[in-house]
Image (cartoon, grey):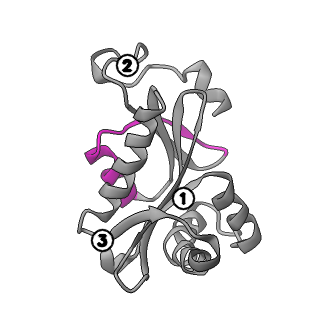
Amino acid sequence: MILRHRRPARDDNQILRLIAAELVPLSQVAHPDLKFDRKLTKKRLAQGTTVVAAGKNGAIKGFITYYIKNRALCVDMLAVQRQARRNGLGTSLLRHAEQVGRKHRCDSAILYVDAGNEAGKAFYRRLGYHELQYLPHSKCYLYVKPLLAAPVYFPLNRPPARFPEWLANA
């Protein structure tokens, strides 16, 4: 399995199928009327950096999309094919993005997890993410992980008691 940057013409159909199979059903638990919009999703992929995990035959087994804003690594989407899970692929993709964040001097990584996605919440907790707050309007949880050795707003490696100002615009 190799990690490489997304090649839109070659990869997007596989990525969109993966999103439809693995991410949309989780979002539909909290938002039953949610419809998958391929055009909007392609736009989201293009706005960030997308790294894919591809097999020797070019088949995409997983991907991560992220961007950097206000010294934060913002993970937009992470998905791994159901049959390829439990092999460290999701961990490799997330660690790759975190390393990019550190290289760009990001203080922390942030991401959202849909309400009801217990497996996702457990995965992120295992990798050092902390649940910061529940956002009832979007029915998801905000998770944060410090990336630098000693972020000012994470004393004793615990998340802050209130929503940091700089995250409001992330």
Q: Earlier in the sequence, mark 3 or mark 1?
A: 1
Q: CA distance from mark 2 to mark 3?
A: 31 Å
Q: From what the image shows, is residue 147 above or below residue 32?
A: above
Are the residues flagged by discs 3 and 1 in contact, CB closer than 8 Å?
no
Q: From what the image shows, is residue 23 above or below residue 78?
A: below
Q: From what the image shows, is residue 5 above or below residue 74?
A: below
Determine the residue located farthest toward the left in the rendered image: 87
Query: Which one is in front in this view, the residue at disc 3 or the one at disc 1?
Result: 1
Q: CA distance from mark 3 to mark 1?
A: 19 Å
Q: From what the image shows, is residue 170 above or below residue 8?
A: above
Q: Which label is found at residue 50?
A: 1
The answer to whether any part of residue 144 appears in the image is no
Is 120 a magenta residue? yes
SS label for mark 1: strand
Q: Which label is found at residue 85?
A: 3
Point out residue 76 in the picture as x, y percentages from the top left corner: 56, 51
Point out residue 27 in the picture as x, y percentages from the top left corner: 57, 63
SS label for mark 3: loop
Query: Which one is in front in this view, the residue at disc 2 or the one at disc 1?
Result: 1
Residue under pointer 2: 154
Amino acid type, residue under disc 3 in the picture: Arg
Left or right position of 155 against 58: left
How many residues crowd around disc 2 within 10 Å: few (fewer than 14), some, or many (20 or more)? some
Amino acid type, residue under disc 1 in the picture: Thr
Point out residue 138 in the picture as x, y percentages from the top left corner: 64, 48
How many residues crowd around disc 1 within 10 Å: few (fewer than 14), some, or many (20 or more)? many
Determine the residue located farthest toward the right in the rendered image: 39
Are the residues flagged by discs 2 and 1 in contact, CB closer than 8 Å?
no
Point out the stretch of residues depicted in magenta. 118-137
